[in-house]
Amino acid sequence: MRPTQIPKTYRVKSFGCQMNVYDGDRMAELLAEQGIQPAAEGEDADLVVLNTCHIREKAAEKVYSDIGRIVKDWGREDGSSPLIAVAGCVAQAEGEEIMARAPAVKMVVGPQAYHRLPEMLRDAAAGKRVTDTDMPAETKFGALPKRRRSGPTAFLTVQEGCDKFCTYCVVPYTRGAEVSRPNADLIDEAKRLVESGAREITLLGQNVNAWTGENAKGQPIGLDGLIRELAEIPDLARIRYTTSHPNDMTEGLVAAHGEIGKLMPFLHLPVQAGNDRVLKAMNRSHTVESYLRILEQVRAVRPDIALSGDFIVGFPGETDAEFEDTLKLVDAVGYAQCFSFKYSPRPGTPAATMDDQIPLAVMDERLQRLQTTLNRDQYAFNKASIGKTCDVLVERKGKHPGQWLGKSPWLQSVHFTGEAQVGDLVTVELTEAGPNSIAARLLDTVTA
Ligand code: SAM
Ligand code: SF4
C-alpha cells in the first residue's frame, strides 16, 4: 500500500499463548470496526499485524524472518507493499530494535496499547513510523469494541500480567503487573459472546486464578465467584479457565470443581519441576508437596478431573538426580496432557545470568525422556476413558465425509460421524483411544 492510504484489508497472525489469540481477535474486531476487511484466504493484505510471543527462544528471529518474507513475497507490481505492524510481547520487549533493524515495520504496539491501533494506523498511513509500548494504568478493554461474533468456543481474558517474577520468565516485564478486569464487564462480555454463538468460554489470564473482583453487593470475590456468576448464563454450557498458579488455588476454587456442573473437569496447573531446590531457584513459591496436596484436594471433590501442567527441563543448575525427581512427580500424578519445554534464557531475567547453564544436548535428552513419559500417560488417560458416555461440543467438520470434531469435558479431541452441526452438544460413547484423540459413537444430540 502507498503511504497516505488507510488499508482496506488486514491479516492478524498470532503466535504463542491463548491470551495472544484473544488479543489477536480483539485487534481484528477493532480493525473491522474501522471498515478494514479481513483479507481473503490466500490473498495479500494491505495491513499485516504480527502478534508476537517472547516466552521462548528465537521469537525475535522468527519475527524478522516473517517480515523479510512478507516484504519479498508480497511486493506488488505497482511497487507498493503491505503496512507491517509488530504487536505482542516481542514488540514490548524489543520495539526499538525492531524499528531500527526493520525499516518495513511502520508500527510497533505493545500488548497493553493495542486499543490505540486506529490512531496509530492514521499516522502510519500518513507516512510516520509509530511506536506505543506504554503500559497504562487504565484498562485498554473499555476502549475496545463490543463482541459481536463468536464460534462455539470463545476465550475471555479476565486477568493480565504477573507479580510472581519466576526467575526464568519474561511475562512480568512484557505484560506488566497483575490486573483483574471488573466483574460486571466480564459478565457483559460473556453474555455477548453467548448471544453471538459461544457455548463454551475459557477464562484466560497469565495467572487466571489470581483474579479478584466484587459482586453486585460490593463484596470481594475470587475466580470461583466469577465462575458461579457465569454459570447462571442460561445458554452457556461449559466454563474452563487457564493458566493457574498453585499458590492462587483457593479453597473456594477447589470446591467449585465439585459444585458447579458447567465447570469442566479439567485443571491446568503448571508445576515446572519436581524438585524443591529447583523450584526455589525458580522462585516458584510452592513445593512439590504443597502442589501434590492441591491435586489431592481437587481429586477429592472431582475424582474424574483431568490434570495438566507445564514443565521446564534444564533450568540452570538442574542435576540429573533433580531431573529424575520431575519424572517421579509425573509418575505420581498421572497427567491427562501437558506442555514441556527446554529452559530458554530470556534477556533481563535473573536465571539468564545464573551459573551452570545446562548444555543443549543434556536438555534435549531430558526433554525427550519427559515427553515420552507424558505421552505414555496421555495415551493411558485416553484409554481409560473408553466406554464412558459424555457430552462433546462440536467445533468443526472432520476430514472424512460426515465426520465431526469436538472436545470431551476432559479436553480430549473426539471425532464421530452422524447428524450434527457446529455448536451442538452431543452425547457420545467413547469407543477407541488414540494417543492424541478418541473415536466415539453418536448417541444423541443434547437439546438443553
Ligand atoms: N503463569 C503460569 C505459571 O506460573 O505456571 C505460566 C504462564 S507462562 C506464560 C507459560 C509457560 O511457559 C510456563 O508455565 C513455563 O513452563 C513456560 N516458560 C516460561 N518461561 C520460560 C523459559 N524461559 N524457558 C522455557 N519455558 C518457559
Ligand atoms: Fe511467568 Fe507464570 Fe511465573 Fe508469572 S507465575 S512469572 S507468568 S511462569
Image: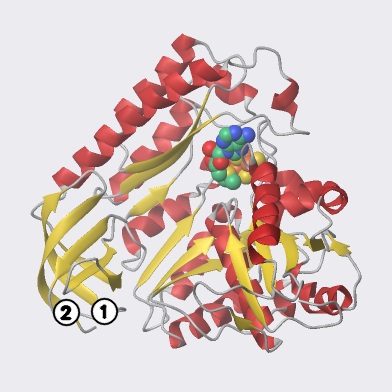
Q: Position of residue 170 (x, y in %)?
A: 70, 41
Q: Which one is nearer the viewer's eye here, 238 or 20?
A: 20
Q: Are marks 1 and 2 in contact (CB under 8 Å)?
A: yes
Q: Position of residue 7 (x, y in %)?
A: 73, 81
Q: Does dot 1 land on a helix, a strand or a loop?
A: loop
Q: Amino acid at mark 2?
A: Thr
The answer as to whether callout 1 falls within 8 Å of ligand 1 is no
Ligand 2 is found in which quarter of the picture?
top right
Q: Position of residue 17 (x, y in %)?
A: 55, 53
Would residue 319 be seen by someone viewing this image from the given angle? yes
Would residue 221 be seen by someone viewing this image from the given angle? no
- Hey, which residue is sitting farthest front in the picture? 77
Q: Position of residue 164 (x, y in %)?
A: 67, 41
Q: Is residue 88 left or right of residue 293?
A: right
Q: Which mark is residue 424?
A: 1
Query: Which residue corresponds to mark 2?
Result: 445
